[in-house]
Structure formats: structure tokens, C-alpha cells
Amino acid sequence: TDERNNIIFTSPENAPISFIEPIENDAIFWNGTKVKVDGNNYVIRNLVVQESANGTTDVGLFRKANNAHFVNVKLEDYTLTAPESSTNVGGLVGFAKDSRIEQSGVYLMPYFRDENGAKQYYSQLRGERGNMMMDHYTSMMVTGGTVVGGLAGKVVGTEITDSFTAVQVSGVNKVGGLVGEAHGKAPSGNTVEGFVPTTNISQYVTIENCYASGDVTAKSNTAGGLIGYAE
């Protein structure tokens, strides 16, 4: 990638900056009109998203999305934190309905320090080697409460393809490396946020050519390397 077009958040010490809350815009992302978010293969690096309010539902870089298309969105050296009382927490999006996520990732980029103490990322060095900072791998994470996923928290009728995560994911229950909870179709009654089931609708969650690496931890019941809970 061309570093001139990446979005890189740094302090004077070249450390991640913690300063933004999840993006929330229901007029764009939740009204059902198709919206596309294209990262154009550039990256957002060193970003920390923090949700401090207790009991919050839908936490991610984007809180929730309905009929959205995320493509080529790369969150590099990224951390998202939410309280244990939160629900639907995902690195990219907290809750995705009738949406598509492709060629996107939440991951760590290994680096070493050069002779001047500056970070050098392996992707920029064309195979040059050095002393990799292994503590870097334990510092980037997605943490929350119930329904926590490295890429997406809860998904309904959504397709995820050619995407991946490489971060630690932790929560209380329904914790997955890629997705916290996947609903293939709406259960009877209005139990899925924003979804009104009908007798003739059938929705599926498709996850294809995806992977998740990194530790996945749930304090309570359910955890999975790829999906925390599926129904």
C-alpha cells in the first residue's frame, strides 16, 4: 500500500491514540438504503475505539449497519474496548443486518525497531528481517461483554467473504474470533434487533474463505475460534 494514503493515528511516541467513540449514523447506516464503505485497500492504523458507557448495545468502529457493503476495510494494529455489560461488540461493526463484508480485516502488523528506534513494518521492507516485537501481538484486542467478535458482533442475513482477524478477542459469553453470534434466519417474534420476521422470508449467514487467529476467551459459557454462537 501507498503510505501517503493510509490513515495513521500516532502520538509523539508513535504509540496508538485512544480518542474516538464508535461511529453512529442511523440516517446512513440503518435506514435500509444500500450504502458502501470501500477502504480501497488502504489501511487505518493505530486506532483505539473506546466505549465507556455501561449496558451499551452495538459497539464497533461502526455501531450497526443495515444493507451495507464493507469492502477492503483494513484495521491494522487496532484495539476496541467495551464494558462487560455491553452487547454486540465487533471490531468493524457491532451489528450487521442484510449486509456484506468482503476483503476486510482486523489484524496486527509485526514490526521491529530500526537503529534509530523507529517502527519498521514488515510489509514495508520487502522481506528484510529484524527483531520482531512479540509483545505487540498481545496488545491489540477486541474486548466486550456478550456477543463479541473480532470482525463483527452479531450478524443476521449477512455474507462475509475473504476476510480475517488476527487479534485477541475476549468477553463474557458468545465470543468468536471472527463473529460473536450468527443468525441464519430470524427467530419467531421480534427478538432480533431491527428485524421483523415474515412467513416467507429465509435469510442465511454465509462465511466463506475467512479465518481468525489469536486467542478467544469467554468468561462464561460460549466461545469459538471462528464463531461464538450460531442459530
Image: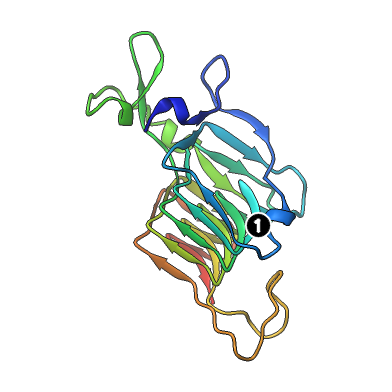
In terms of depth relative to the viewer, which is nearer, 62 or 59? 62
**Colour basis:** rainbow
In-image side of 153 versus 210 (left or right):
right
Image quarter of the N terminus? top left
Q: Residue at x 70, y 79 (%)?
A: 196
- How packed mark 1 is, by other alpha carbons closer than 10 Å (few <14, some 14-19, many 20 or more), is many
Label 1: which secondary element: strand
Seen in the picture, residue 183 relative to 121 is either above or below; the reply is: below
Q: Quadrant of residue 85?
A: bottom right
Instruction: State the residue lying farthest toward the bottom.
Output: 199
Residue 120 location (% of width, % of height):
36, 21
Residue 107 location (% of width, % of height):
43, 42
In terms of depth relative to the viewer, which is nearer, 112 or 224? 112
Seen in the picture, residue 94 relative to 231 is either above or below; the reply is: above
Residue 192 location (% of width, % of height):
68, 73
Residue 42 location (% of width, % of height):
44, 37
Residue ID for mark 1: 64
Which amino acid does the dot numbered 1 rest on?
Answer: Lys
Q: Quadrant of residue 222?
A: bottom right
Q: Residue at x 42, y 59 (%)?
A: 225
Q: Is residue 164 visible?
A: yes
Q: Is residue 145 visible?
A: no
Q: Quadrant of residue 57?
A: bottom right
Q: Residue at x 54, y 77 (%)?
A: 231
**Number of marks in the rendered image:** 1
